């Protein structure tokens, strides 16, 4: 049992040390893939700004879509009270 626990602990330590945090992206990247990750991340130095802008646009779009859905449901409720009755 003690040998098994030692092997499990070594395996966990080995796996956790195989990943490093990228200084550019902040993501955990496997040691063997770090060179390729860095190459790609350095191709476009403004990638973080572009990524953040894209995420902001997506979140705004989702909020607008939610508002549209809410307005449409409210309108439908007013127009079709026979469907949305709470008896």
Image: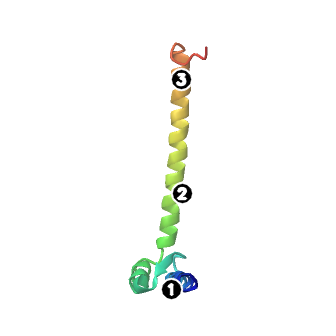
The image position of residue 59, as x and y in percent, is 53, 52
> Are the two marked residues, 2 and 1, in contact with CB atoms closer than 8 angstroms?
no
Whole-angstrom CA distance, mark 1 to mark 3, is 59 Å
Residue 66 location, x and y as percent?
53, 40
Q: Earlier in the sequence, mark 2 or mark 1?
A: 1
Q: In this orientation, which residue lies closer to the viewer: 26 or 63?
A: 26
* Quarter where residue 6 is shown: bottom right
Disc 1 target residue: 14
Residue lying at 51% horizontally and 29% vertically, measured from the top left: 72
Q: SS for tag 2?
A: helix
75, above or below 5, in the image: above
Q: Residue at x 53, y 42 (%)?
A: 64
Question: Residue under circle 3?
Answer: 75
Tell me, for residue 25, which label it has, or none.
Answer: none
Residue nearer the viewer, 86 or 3? 3
C-alpha separation, residue under disc 2 versus residue under disc 1: 37 Å
Q: Position of residue 56 (x, y in %)?
A: 54, 57
Q: Nearer the viewer, residue 31 or 51?
A: 31
Q: Residue 46: tell me if it is visible.
A: yes
Which SS class for mark 3? helix
Badge number at residue 56: 2
């Amino acid at each position: 049992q003690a040998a098994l626990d030692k092997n499990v602990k070594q395996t966990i330590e080995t796996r956790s040390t195989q990943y490093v945090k990228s200084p550019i992206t902040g993501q955990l990247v496997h040691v063997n893939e770090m060179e390729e990750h860095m190459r790609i991340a350095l191709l476009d130095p403004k990638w973080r700004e572009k990524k953040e802008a894209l995420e902001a646009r997506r979140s705004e779009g989702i909020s607008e879509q939610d508002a549209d859905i809410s307005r449409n449901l409210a309108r439908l409720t007013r127009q079709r009270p026979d469907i949305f009755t709470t008896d």
